[in-house]
Structure formats: structure tokens, C-alpha cells
Image: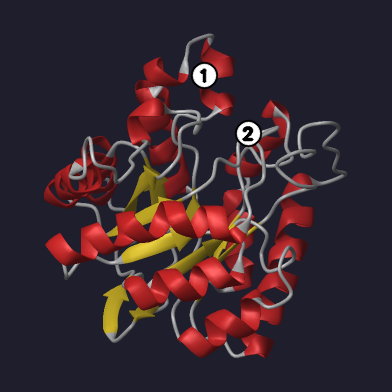
């Protein structure tokens, strides 16, 4: 079925971000343990400009959004408290918006307190891997903040999700979960909801590829779709390489995602993703 626009826009604190064409979201991890080291940034006395450097490069390369996260959610990662996560992400967000006030920053968190503090610091979107299930205050908090909300599918938690993922029909079950997530978000008062099928979160390699090949089935949800496959294990394990060597595979799957209807690509490497969007457009994408 391919790309469906239907006039989607995201109201990012008064700035309307249109999805008339696919958009690119750059990843900045305020962590020491995220699986791809080049995405890690920290504000400290040794290199206070590191987040600004990476953000500036991503914006120059064409990033439409910047996604800042304070804890790794790779399989088996340690869960952080809201206080720890706030201490990590706030200085990064503040540094970015101070240097690039027009940047549209997303905060990657499942803690409502972190979301609230981040938006007050300048973030304009909340990206929640738990779809509001980890913190009962998340949906009402985002509604009060009046920012777009990204709800992701995950089976289990980051600590348990890869223990024994199982599905009868992975695309159907992810679709049903995301339909419920969107309903809960709208019922809470959130106006702009983006849905993420959660590649790599509680899914085997086979589940991931089946889900990607059937991504267009999620168009029935009538919501923008975000796809995050960048340098993930579904690529580097399939190819027998490391995350550092998975850019070519990432680029290939980004084109597949666009052809199957993705609206936003969440990426470590902005320039190659922007090129994929340009080539997709040259192929007649969206027509």
C-alpha cells in the first residue's frame, strides 16, 4: 500500500511539522551503554559541547527531529530511575535548544516526570517505548503538555523482552496493540499520536523481518508510523557484522520501510537516511 499521508501534521509546541514526505529523526543517547557508541553524548566539564556538535551535524545533514534518551533500552539493559534519567537528558536538551532554538527535540523516556521536565527544558515531543504502560501518569502528563506522543510496541520489558518472544501473527498482534495504544492516548487527551512497531523489542529476527515486510498492514490504524531499525541486531546478526558495520544494511532496510509506509525514520546516521528519502521520492514515493 505504501506511504499514506492523509494530511498528517504534528503540533510541536506551536510549530507544525508536516508529514507530507517522510521525515528523519536523529538519535542522541545521553548514556554510557547504548549499543552504538557513536550515538552517545554527555554534557560534562571535559566536553560540554559534545551534544551540540552532534546535534548541529545532524541538523545540517537534514534531520527533522532530534531524539534524546537517557538510558539504554537494549536487551538486558539496567533500568534507571526517573531522577537518574533526568540528570542525564536535561543538560543535553538544554544545550541543544540553547544553540539551536528552532530544533524539534524529542525526549525518549517512559517516565512521566522526565517527560515533564524535558518539555519544560525545550523538548517538543515525547517518545515512549512502553506506550504508557510503565508509568500510569504518562498519558495524562503528555496530554497536559500538549505535545506529540510516540507510542511503541514491546512484548515484555527491556530486561525480559528477548527471553522468549512469541506471536501467532506478529503484524496483526502489533497492529492490535498499537490500536489500543492510540485509543488510550487519544482518550487521555493527546492530539498527535505516532505509532512505532518496535523493531527489536520482544521480537526474534524472523518476527522483525515479517513485521517489516507486512508493515503496510498497519496503515489501517490511520496514524503516522515511526520505524527504528538503525544498526539493530536484525541487521548486524543477519549480516554477521557489528553495529559499526551495519550502515549499508540499515540503508537497505530504510528504503524497504519507506516503500511499506513509514513516515519517520529514527536513525543514527542522518545524511544516508536523507538520501534514502530523496531516492524514494525519485521512485515516485507517495504517489
Q: Are discs 1 and 2 less than 8 Å apart at CB?
A: no
Q: Which residue is mark 2?
A: 209
Q: Which mark is residue 16?
A: none
Residue nearer the viewer, 49 or 173: 49
Report the Cα–Cα distance between label 1 and label 2. 13 Å
- Considering only vertical position in the picture, is 224 above or below 59? below
Residue nearer the viewer, 224 or 198: 198
Q: Is residue 245 left or right of residue 132?
A: left
Q: What colouring style does the render use?
A: secondary structure
Q: Is residue 33 left or right of residue 199?
A: left
Placement of the C terminus among the 4 image quadrants: bottom left
Q: Secondary structure at mark 1?
A: helix
Q: Is residue 261 visible?
A: no
In the rendered image, residue 47, in percent from the top left (x then y), is placed at: 21, 37
Q: Which mark is residue 236?
A: 1
In the rendered image, residue 221, in percent from the top left (x then y), is placed at: 62, 70
Amino acid at each position: 500500500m505504501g506511504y499514506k499521508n492523509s494530511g498528517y501534521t504534528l503540533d510541536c509546541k506551536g510549530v507544525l511539522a508536516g508529514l507530507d514526505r517522510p521525515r528523519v529523526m536523529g538519535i542522541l543517547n545521553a548514556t554510557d551503554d547504548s549499543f552504538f557508541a557513536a550515538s552517545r553524548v554527555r554534557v560534562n566539564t571535559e566536553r560540554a559541547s559534545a551534544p551540540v556538535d552532534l546535534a548541529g551535524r545532524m541538523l545540517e545533514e537534514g534531520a527533522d527531529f532530534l531524539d534524546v534518551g537517557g538510558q539504554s533500552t537494549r536487551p538486558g539493559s539496567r533500568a534507571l530511575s526517573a531522577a537518574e534519567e533526568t540528570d542525564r537528558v536535561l543538560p543535553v536538551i538544554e544545550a541543544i535548544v540553547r544553540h539551536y532554538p528552532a530544533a524539534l527535540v524529542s525526549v525518549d523516556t517512559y517516565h512521566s516526570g522526565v517527560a515533564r521536565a524535558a518539555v519544560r527544558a525545550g523538548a517538543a515531543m515525547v517518545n515512549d517505548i512502553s506506550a504508557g504502560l510503565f508509568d500510569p501518569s504518562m498519558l495524562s502528563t503528555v496530554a497536559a503538555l500538549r505535545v506529540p506522543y510516540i507510542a511503541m510496541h514491546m512484548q515484555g520489558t527491556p530486561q525480559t523482552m528477548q527471553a522468549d518472544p512469541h506471536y501467532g501473527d506478529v503484524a496483526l498482534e502489533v497492529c492490535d496493540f498499537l490500536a489500543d495504544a492510540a485509543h488510550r492516548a487519544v482518550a487521555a487527551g493527546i492530539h498527535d499520536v505516532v505509532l512505532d512497531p518496535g523493531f527489536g523489542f520482544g521480537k526474534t529476527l524472523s518476527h522483525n523481518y515479517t513485521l517489516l515486510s507486512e508493515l503496510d498492514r498497519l496503515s489501517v490504524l490511520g496514524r503516522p508510523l515511526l520505524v527504528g531499525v538503525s544498526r539493530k541486531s536484525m541487521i548486524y546478526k543477519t549480516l554477521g557484522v557489528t553495529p559499526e558495520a551495519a550502515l549499508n544494511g540499515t540503508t537497505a532496510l530504510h528504503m524497504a520501510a519507506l516503500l511499506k509506509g513509514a513516515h519517520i525514520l529514527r536513525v543514527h546516521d542522518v545524511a544516508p537516511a536523507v538520501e534514502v528519502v530523496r531516492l524514494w521520492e525519485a521512485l515516485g514515493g507517495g504517489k
